[in-house]
Image: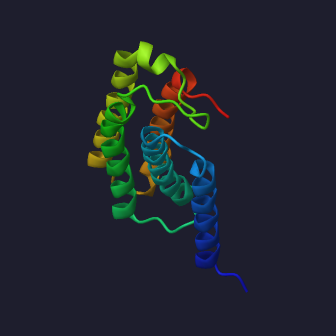
Amino acid sequence: MVTKSLKVIIVFNFLTVSAALAHSDVKDKDVMARMKLMSLMADNMKVIGMMLKQKIPFEQEKAVNAIKEISRLATETPGAFKKNATDPKSEAKPNIWAEFDNFTEISLKLATDANSLAASFQSFENLKPALGQLSKSCKTCHTSYREKK
């Protein structure tokens, strides 16, 4: 019998291996660092999503920590993209550097929004609006600055 905990472990391992494979052929160290940062951001979003879908138990502290980590990573994002590094595996559109001020503004807004959400987060009922607001910020940036490969 496969327990819920075992399923979570299997899914986590699958996602970890998938991310490792996606980054396996990246040659440029700066691109690799950016991709790892974005993967960490996605991992923290997944924690919130999995709690919302009740795939993992809701833990307020864990949810707040994931949101705080998203804020920290969003603050680091402009620095990770400051150098216009390229790699065939990179999903960064070239207009990031042409519009770097706007890119930075979007990243820092995500950080601010995440900090506000973490500060006011109190219960399971906060998951859906938090995920919605964070996802909207991610989509704003990805629509303009991410190229799916």
Give the answer, above or below, for where 47 lies relative to 39: below
Residue name at image x 61 percent, y 34 percent: 88
Residue name at image x 34 percent, y 50 percent: 69
Q: Quadrant of residue 21?
A: bottom right
Q: Foreground: 66 or 51?
A: 66
Looking at the image, which residue sits at the far front?
27
Give the answer, above or below, for where 30 lies relative to 20: above
Q: Foreground: 88 or 2?
A: 88
- Coloration of the structure image: rainbow
Residue name at image x 54 percent, y 52 percent: 49
Screen quadrant of the N terminus? bottom right
Query: Image check: 28 left or right of 89?
Result: left
Residue name at image x 52 percent, y 24 percent: 145
Give the answer, above or below, for where 39 lies relative to 75: below
Screen quadrant of the C terminus? top right
Q: Foreground: 86 or 95?
A: 86
Looking at the image, which residue sits at the far left?
119
Rendered location of residue 75, percent (x, y) = 30, 37
Rendered location of residue 28, percent (x, y) = 48, 40
Rendered location of residue 52, percent (x, y) = 54, 55
Q: Give the tally of numbered discs.
A: 0
Residue 53 visible in rendering: no
